[in-house]
Image: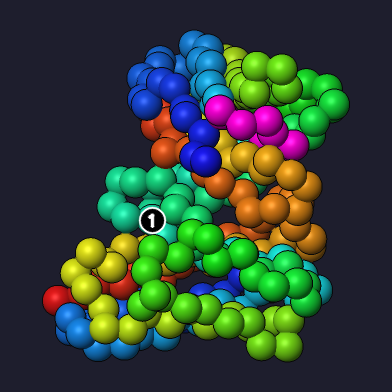
Amino acid sequence: QQPVQSPQAVILREGEDAVINCSSSKALYSVHWYRQKHGEAPVFLMILLKGGEQKGHEKISASFNEKKQQSSLYLTASQLSYSGTYFCGTEDQAGTALIFGKGTTLSVSS
Amino acid sequence: GAGVSQSPSNKVTEKGKDVELRCDPISGHTALYWYRQSLGQGLEFLIYFQGNSAPDKSGLPSDRFSAERTGGSVSTLTIQRTQQEDSAVYLCASSPQGGQPQHFGDGTRLSIL
C-alpha cells in the first residue's frame, strides 16, 4: 500500500524550516527517505527502523512514530541545495519491497 | 567505485515493438529493484529481486512486463508490445541486502511513438 505524503509542495526562503510527513494505513517495519533533484537519480537520506530513535544530521532529521504509522522529515535552516523532491518509502516487513509515496517538492529560494 | 549502470540511457521505439532495458548493479549487492517514473510523478515499484529468492513481481502493471536477473547480477526488464502509456523513465536500484539504502542508476528514458 502506497504511503501518503504531505504536503505535496513547499516553497521556502533560505533559512526557513520545513516538515514533510509520510503516513501509512499499515503497520510499518521501516521508513526510508530519499531526495531527487531535477533530472537526477534519487539519493538516499536516511532509514528509520521500527523501535529505532530519531535520526539525522544537524539540519536534516527524521522521526518515526510506529503507533501512528507515520514518519516526519525535518529540514531546518534550509539551504538552496535542499531543493528537490523528497520521497518516503515504506517496508511493512523486513526485506520486503520498498513502496514509495508520490513525493513532496521543496523549492528553496534566496 | 562503479555505481549502478543502466543501458540504454534513452530509447525511442514504435508502439507495438518489444524493448529490453538493462541494469548492472553494484558488485556484491544482492537486492535489485526496478521502478517506473512518469513525468512529474513518483517512483512506481515494479519488481524486486533478493538473492536467490523468488522475485516480488507484485508491481508489474501487466503481463507485457517481465524481468529476470541472471547469475544474481545483471537484470533485464522486458516490455512486450509497447504502448504509449509505457513512456517513462525506468530506474533500477541495488542495495547490499533488502531493506538497506538503495543506490539508483541514472535510468532509461523510454519514449513510445
The amino acid type found where label 1 is placed reads Gln
From the top left corner, tell me how far across and down residue A108 is, in percent: 41, 24
Residue bearing mark 1: B37
Please report the residue visible at 55 percent of the width from the left and 66 percent of the height from the top.
Answer: B57
Is residue A100 left or right of A107 when viewed as pictured? Answer: right
The mark tally for this picture is 1
Please report the residue visible at 83 percent of the width from the left and 22 percent of the height from the top.
Answer: A53
From the top left corner, tell me how far across and down residue B56 is, in percent: 61, 64
Please report the residue visible at 74 percent of the width from the left and 44 percent of the height from the top.
Answer: A93
Q: Does the magenta-highlighted stretch encompass residue A26?
A: yes
Q: In this view, does A14 lie above or below B103?
A: above
Q: Badge 1 sits on which subunit?
A: B
Q: Does the magenta-highlighted stretch encompass residue A52?
A: no
Q: Can residue A15 be seen in this view?
A: no
From the top left corner, tell me how far across and down residue B20 is, in percent: 42, 85
Which secondary structure dominates the residues rendered in magenta?
loop
The quadrant in which the C terminus of chain B is found is bottom left
Most distant residue in the left direction: B113
Residue bounds of the magenta highlight: A24-32
Please report the residue visible at 68 percent of the width from the left and 30 percent of the height from the top.
Answer: A27
Colour scheme of the rendered structure: rainbow
Quarter of the image for residue A104 reads: top left
